[in-house]
């Protein structure tokens, strides 16, 4: 596992350096949308709903529409002015009984791994939570947003459990729940008896995702029966030269010119090669092109393989040195 956050748990005068790891993963089978006729991937364009024109990523800003139909746009400068939490401390606010926490508030779980030198205070905090049957309410900044969270114990690990804010939990507004329902004692007894007859200790390993297993079996069955076809290669669209391609071509021309100049022994050819210029976009503009830089990087890595220069034999090298013209002496003209 790769740590996604590092910091320290702080309570009182105790600080426990820790690293956070995502405690869960998703094993769903991922599908792509493809054209049924030829298997080509389906691509989506960002278009404006007003004029129907395709919009570049750099021209897109965040907008908020009010209830009365007013549109408010936020620029990058506006977003940069917002307060962001970037601290690396899990600050314990209070310790609360475990049975007072509604599981509906739980959001995402992270395992906390202690630093090598913090194994003892980590164990002390863990055992204190277990013996008192309490959870620690904390505040933590994850991905530049402050979140309310819990510290709870699972086996030998302390879990950082992020939570929803109270106003993010809906109330069940069902009128039927307010109606009086008459329940006879015999019915209550029978229902309780049924619950007891199906009682068991919870073991999550007894359950599995049958739908996902069926999807995997279906895919494997189609593969083994030959019901497949080669994945198509997307046709290259003529989108014009990009900055990375221009830069790559310029560098290649410079290398070839430098090699030709070295073979001819002309000192001016190296300067001519180094003067090759290219009109390249800034890095941030290339990054905002919505994936263009990634395609350019792949094309640059594929189209220009690294070559190891061949070494000349000693005899040929000496002959080349003797054949090279002697450098001309520059004379200074009298003023």
Image (cartoon, rainbow, N blue to C red):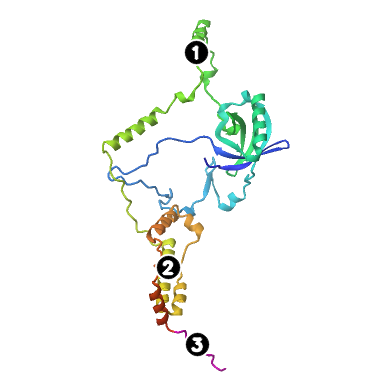
Q: Quadrant of the C terminus?
A: bottom right
* Range of magenta residues: 326-335
Label 3 packing within 10 angstroms: few (<14), some (14-19), many (20+): few
- Does the stretch in magenta take in 212? no
Picture disc at residue 250: 2
- On screen, 247 above or below 81? below
Cα separation, mark 2 vs mark 1, equals 77 Å
Q: Is there any visible trace of residue 8 in the rendered image?
A: no
In the picture provided, is 143 more to the left or to the right than 234? right
Q: Are marks 2 and 1 in contact (CB under 8 Å)?
A: no
In the current view of this chain or complex, which residue is farthest to the top? 186
Q: Which residue is mark 3?
A: 329
Q: Earlier in the sequence, mark 2 or mark 3?
A: 2
Other residues around mark 1 within 10 Å, as few (<14) / some (14–19) / many (≥20)? few
From mark 2 to mark 3, how far is it between C-alphas? 33 Å
Q: Earlier in the sequence, mark 2 or mark 1?
A: 1
Picture coordinates of residue 331, whole percent (x, y): 52, 90
Q: SS of the residue at dot 2? A: helix
Q: Residue at x 35, y 59 (%)?
A: 238
Classify 127 as above or below 228: above
Q: Which mark is residue 195?
A: 1
């Amino acid at each position: 596992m790769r740590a996604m956050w590092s910091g320290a748990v702080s309570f009182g005068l105790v600080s426990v350096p820790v690293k956070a790891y995502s405690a869960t993963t998703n094993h769903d089978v991922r599908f792509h949308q493809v054209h049924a006729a030829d298997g080509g991937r389906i691509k989506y364009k960002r278009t404006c709903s007003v004029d129907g024109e395709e919009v570049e990523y750099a021209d897109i800003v965040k907008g908020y529409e009010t209830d009365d139909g007013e549109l408010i746009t936020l620029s990058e400068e506006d977003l940069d002015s917002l307060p962001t939490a970037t601290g690396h401390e899990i600050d314990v606010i209070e310790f609360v009984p475990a049975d007072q926490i509604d599981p509906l508030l739980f959001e995402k779980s992270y395992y906390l791994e202690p630093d090598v030198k913090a194994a003892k205070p980590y164990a002390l905090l863990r055992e204190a939570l277990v013996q008192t049957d309490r959870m620690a309410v904390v505040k933590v900044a994850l991905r530049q947003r402050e979140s309310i969270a819990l510290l709870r114990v699972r086996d030998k690990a302390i879990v950082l459990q992020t939570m929803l804010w109270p106003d993010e939990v809906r109330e069940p507004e069902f009128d039927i729940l307010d109606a009086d329902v008459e329940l006879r004692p015999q019915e209550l007894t029978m229902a309780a008896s049924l619950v007891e007859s199906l009682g068991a200790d919870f073991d999550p390993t007894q359950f599995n995702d049958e739908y996902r297993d069926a999807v995997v079996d279906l895919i494997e069955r189609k593969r083994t029966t030959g019901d497949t076809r080669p994945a198509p290669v997307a046709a290259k669209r003529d989108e014009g030269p990009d900055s990375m391609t221009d830069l790559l071509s310029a560098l290649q021309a410079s290398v070839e010119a430098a090699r030709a100049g070295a073979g001819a022994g002309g000192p001016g050819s190296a300067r001519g090669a180094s003067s090759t210029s290219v009109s390249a976009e800034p890095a941030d503009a290339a990054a905002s092109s919505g994936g263009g830089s990634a395609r350019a990087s792949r094309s640059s890595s594929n189209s220009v393989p690294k070559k190891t220069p061949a070494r000349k034999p000693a005899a040929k090298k000496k002959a080349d040195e003797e054949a090279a013209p002697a450098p001309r002496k520059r004379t200074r003209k009298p003023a």
